[in-house]
Amino acid sequence: MKPARRIDLLGAVGLATLLGLGGRLFAISIVRHRDLRTAAERRSRRATVLPPRRGAILDRNRLPLARDLPVQQVVVDLPELDPTLSLVPRLAWCLRIERLEALARLRQARALVEGRDPDETEVLLGVVPIEEGERIKRLLRRSRHLRGEPAPAGIRLVVSAGVLQKRYGVLTRLADLLGLERAAIDAQVTDRVSEIYALDDREERLIAWREPLVVLRRADFAQVARVTERAFELRGVEVRERFERHYPQADTAVHLIGTLGAPSASEAVRDVRDGRVIDSGATLRDYVLQRRREVPADMRLRDERYGRTGLERSQQDRIRGVPGIRVEVRDVKGGVRDTLLDVAPRDGETLELTLDVEIQRGAERALDEAVRRWGDAQAGGAAVLIDLADGGVLALASSPRYDPNTLGEDYPQIVKDPRKPLLHRAVLAQAPGSTFKILSAFAIHDPAEPDALPVGWTTTCTGRLTRREARSGGRCDGHHGETGLAKAIEQSCNIYFYRAAHHIGLHPLSDWAAALGIDRPIGLDIGGERRGQIPYVGYKADRLDDQVASVALWSRRLAEAARRDPPDALALRQAYDRLEHAETWRKRHARDQTLRPGEVRNTIIGQGDVQLNPLQVATIAALVASEGQVPLPRLIRDTTPVVRSLPLDPRTLAAVQRGMRRVVTHGTARKEEMGLRHLDVAGKTGTAERQGKEPDGSPKPNLAWFMGYYPASAPEVAFAVLVDRTRGHGGAVCAPVTRALLEAYEQARGGRLR
Amino acid sequence: MSGFLSFRAMREVSRFPGTLLGICLTLIGISLLVIHSASVRPDGTANPFVLRQVIWACAGLTVFGVLAHIPYPRIGRRSLVLFLLGIGALAAVFVIGTTVNGAKRWISVGPIRLQPSEFMKYVLVIVLARTIAGAGPRIRTWRGLAEISAVTAIPFLMVLTQPDLGTALTYLPILVTMVFVAGARLRHLAAVAGVGLGSLPVALPLAWAFVLKDYQKLRILAFLDSSGHSLGGAYQTTQSMIAIGSGGLFGRGYMQGTQGPLGFLPERHTDFIFAVICEDFGLVGGVVVLGLYGYLIATLARIARSSRDVEGRLLVTGVTTILTTQVAVNVGMALGVTPVTGLTLPLVSYGGSSLVAAMAGFGLAASVARSRVVAFTPE
């Protein structure tokens, strides 16, 4: 071959090499372009989510009941703090040991190198046989902190002291600055890590890693200043602003304000799947890669606390706010170079209530006192005060209560408390007793009803119904003699109503109750209100249908739970219990399908199957006070008042008003010690009896009620007071509470009791 | 025309390898542009690399001019002196060398760090060209081949023990191509290649156990697992491939990338400058640079062909081989097809030794070009 040909050949080889490289270049920069561009962007961008401020809840005088306070939290980013942590699963896999053992090995290694020269010391974590090079390659690919050293025995897996010391170094400095124990913080880190490794789902683990560990929930100014100042030697430590819900009035109005809680596991999973959690893996990635730029209103933060009860729950959408997000370009050392996306958080609305904290507190104090004095070990109570002008709820008290600021810590005791402090008794439906007679009165004398009795109708009360009228029951508390409507209310005469019941039957009662709105929550915006119930013609058949449906439902659930593999013990247990309960009631209802006269009698005096919540009982009082133009109760100031109009027969109304006034002056609440006698107030007592016996054989304690309006001559407010589980009588137990409630009302507006 | 310039001057101009110099200047220009992009520190300030590189470029051009002006046989005659000087410098590295990343490769002279192994490549080319040309037809015998190989073996082993496997390995293609062009029997070359390949299974474990340093083994491990992240070579390769891939067809724009300017890509102004080119200017930028190298290789091959003697032809062959090997290994490294060795991209990577050495090599080629036979007839 000629030299020239040889040169040509070599040149060709050189050019061919370049061509080959060009091909590879094409493959990377064109074919893999999208993936690699994404990789570059993920590497250089960092997203920070910005929590919104949840709206405050204020009373009518703008006194805060609940508000978000900014807190500075000191948090630690785990992978940043301890680069060895993220290696644990692979290390375990590589060395064929358990994860916890791998963790332990790293911990030992850390203890070993404490105080050693970070550059000179290395720790051997394990040796992998050469044949398993594949394993170690995968491990090394993940980390720049581990080194593989080929040795005759195999590949020695080595980690430098510098990497191991990082965690203790940072934590020691941090503990110093915050005035905490390093061991305590370290234990927190270890606990969290063990928790994360206990998670089975890989995706869940990845998300858990990204969540910083809160070392200090509320850092004071000095601590924040110290940490910020030393930030350069505290890699992985950050100070972030979060909001914490604070309830300045402690337990006042706790039930109606409500509480916050973390979303349940199933809600969390669903929200993450639907892309509604801004800092969950996939959603955050979309923002980082700028596939999303807007933050919709239903977006939430992973650690956002949801309204679980009360207004916090019912007004959740108004007050929660929407998180913001900032996506920045950061260099390899974490310095911010550019901001790609900056959506400010939108703070939640402030909620102004019609409630008056002063009245509320007065009501609660009196209620607590009455419950303590009159109630048994499981007793509780409620008090409602409604402004007749617009339905605004001035007080909505429940007893007993708890302090929402420390609910987390107190929870175990609270759930064990037999008085059930978590119950919001002001919206819980219970038997209204004789207070219901006021509504019954309008039904009895409704001129629109063909069977209605005339207003002047009287009957003679001899203390009980005759044998012919009722085989059993049918008793009255006294011998009232000749009794008309006003007197029947004044003395709470059962006989008058029993005989009326025989006359009109069930449907006028249920019609009137429905017209007022007993069968649904009566308030416009009061969270957690339970609807009342009243027997109607055919309600027993409906009740049975409901139970039959319930039995069918729970049988199906039980079968589903049993089929599941592995069997879901909890679901199985729950379905079985529910089924058993439904079946018991189905049998009971199946045997009880005829409406007996005694049941109509019970209904008309607010016993038996009648159930109203205190708010509804107060609304009955409002019906009388407003002469048929009932303002529906409402709590939030900017909602439009709604008036429910019920045409009342003027003569009946006059008799009822007279009767209710006389209750206080001559009737069941006339006694001096009840405190209402000299006030311009009208009302009605109620003492609902529970059927059945206590476990010790004694009869079940009563519900004591008092409802009415004030001032009787020119009504401004309507009220209802309930003390549950007492041996006392409605007037004796509840009238003093009413007095205190009205006193608080007058005090709040600078007036005096009239 | 001849009124302005003498015939001699006209001949000088026509023989001057303008294309060669033009390509070199273009590449240096690109280099300065990209080094500027790559010298931005993560915190936004810039390293003073461009200015230094301009100074080195001036030095390189001076060396180019001087060597192009000197007839190459005058250099060839001093090849023994050069060889001894080179060996001496390599030996000096062991005594007064600066240790970086566990290897002694540099000699510090004041603020300048010199890498004798870099210059040794060109000295080797000069020495081999002289020796092979002197050996004449003996190159076609086993004995002649062995003598010549022995000359290469001395610097090869010295650089290998620094240790600098990458540079040492570039000595081998120089020997092979020069011997090939000089007219060695294909039979001999094939036999050597065969024995070499046959001994690999024996040599590799031996090399693994005794010769290779830990970081070299790891680099090889990392290379074998080319998709790897985060460890030594693998980490760098990953970052480099992300940089190249994110550039796409037209690139992200000058200094608009993320891998380079934000500091994710290590050694971006030296070893991985090709990745910066591709991140900023995309496939188009990469192809332009590769095309310039291709043009350079073609130009050098033409010079080699038209050389009037064997020594000149071999000199250009050696220089071309150095160029091609370095480009192939460096670009291959950025593309994840060759191991991470620390070989620079000639003329483009930041670094004085590399630039001056490359320009010296092209100066030699220019000298050969100037002495070639040109079909030029004055009117």
Image (cartoon, grey):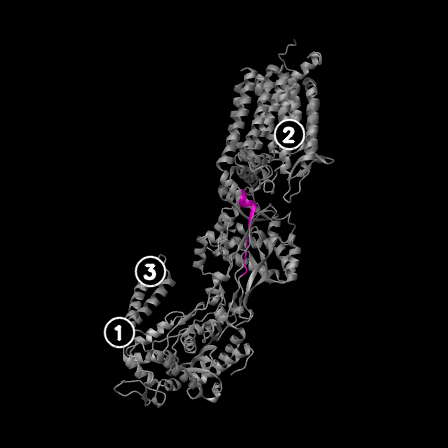
Q: Which mark is residue B130?
A: none
Q: Earlier in the sequence, mark 1 or mark 3?
A: 3
Identify residue type, mark 3: Ala
Q: Is residue A358 left or right of residue A453?
A: right
Q: CA distance from mark 2 to mark 1?
A: 101 Å
Residue lying at the far front of the rendered structure: A650
Q: Nearer the viewer, mark 2 or mark 3?
A: 2
Mark 1 crowdedness (10 Å alpha carbons): few <14, some 14-19, many ≥20: some
Relative height, residue A707 to residue B374 (above, below): below
Q: Which mark is residue B28?
A: 2
Q: Which residue occupies the foreground of this view, B347 or A222?
A: A222
**Magenta extent:** A40-53
Discs 1 and 3 carry the same chain letter: yes
Mark 2 crowdedness (10 Å alpha carbons): few <14, some 14-19, many ≥20: many
Q: CA distance from mark 1 to mark 3?
A: 34 Å
The answer to whether one can see residue B326 in this image is yes
Relative height, residue A356 to residue A25 (above, below): below
Q: Which residue occupies the foreground of this view, A291 or B205?
A: A291
Q: Is residue A42 magenta?
A: yes
Discs 2 and 1 carry the same chain letter: no
Q: Which residue is mark 1?
A: A593
Circle 1 SS class: loop
Q: Which mark is residue A562?
A: 3
